[in-house]
Image (tube, rainbow, N blue to C red):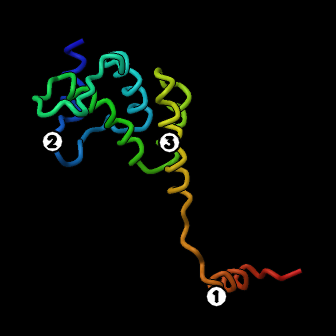
Amino acid sequence: MGLGREFLVALLGGRHEVGPIIGLFQTPSFLQDLYLLMHKVVPVEEDIDRIGMGVYSPTIQDEAQEARERIVAQLEQLPGELSLEALRRLSLEHPVPRYRDYIKAIVKRRTVKDGDLLDWPLQEVAKLAISLNCRTP
């Protein structure tokens, strides 16, 4: 399992690497498949919870579990219907049931964000109605 953890960290970067991760693998369907695979290689049951444990030196497990969860963040940031659909599928197929609600919340947030439109001033609506030759009943 160690090689899988090292692969994931090499592919997505560790906790101290900043900037965008570059690669053609960053398509919604690939990220979805990678995320599901990484849950087999880096299962949640083996996650290390360091909250309240003071100072520590991160291990490859720490790096791998953080990289695994960054995949969802990358999907959330990718624009378009394909990434939203990948998130929807994860919200249904996630191997850990308690994570499904978390991803459903991300889907809801993305749906609202993607649907946000600026309010049209009434004058713009009237112009559009005139240009479309709309009449009131």
Please rate how many residues cluster around mark 3, counting C-alpha atoms within 10 Å: few if below 14, some from 14 to 19, many from 20: some
In the drawing, what numbered circle is on residue 82? Answer: 3
Name the residue that disc number 1 marks.
123
**Along the viewing direction, whichever of 59 and 90 lies nearer the viewer:** 59
Rendered residue at 55%/51% (across/down): 111
Q: Quick check: 36 left or right of 55?
A: right
Q: Amino acid at mark 1?
A: Gln
Rendered residue at 53%/25% (across/down): 93
Identify the image quadrant of the C terminus. bottom right
Q: Upstream in the sequence, badge 1 or badge 3?
A: 3
Rendered residue at 37%/21% (across/down): 39
Where is 91 relative to 125, above or below? Answer: above
Q: Report the mark closest to the observer, 1 or 3.
A: 1
**Along the viewing direction, whichever of 60 and 30 lies nearer the viewer:** 60
Residue 91 is situated, as x and y percent measured from the top left of the image, at 53, 32
Q: Amino acid at mark 2?
A: Glu
Q: Upstream in the sequence, badge 2 or badge 3?
A: 2
Q: Report the mark closest to the observer, 2 or 3.
A: 2
Q: Report the mark closest to the observer, 2 or 1.
A: 2
Rendered residue at 44%/33% (across/down): 29
The Cα atoms of the two marked residues, 2 and 3, are separated by 27 Å
Identify the image quadrant of the N terminus. top left
Instruction: Identify the image quadrant of residue 58.
Output: top left
Please rate how many residues cluster around mark 1, counting C-alpha atoms within 10 Å: few if below 14, some from 14 to 19, many from 20: few
Please rate how many residues cluster around mark 2, counting C-alpha atoms within 10 Å: few if below 14, some from 14 to 19, many from 20: few
Name the residue that disc number 2 marks.
17
Asked if labels 1 and 2 touch by Cβ distance under 8 angstroms, the answer is no
Where is 2 relative to 22, above or below? Answer: above
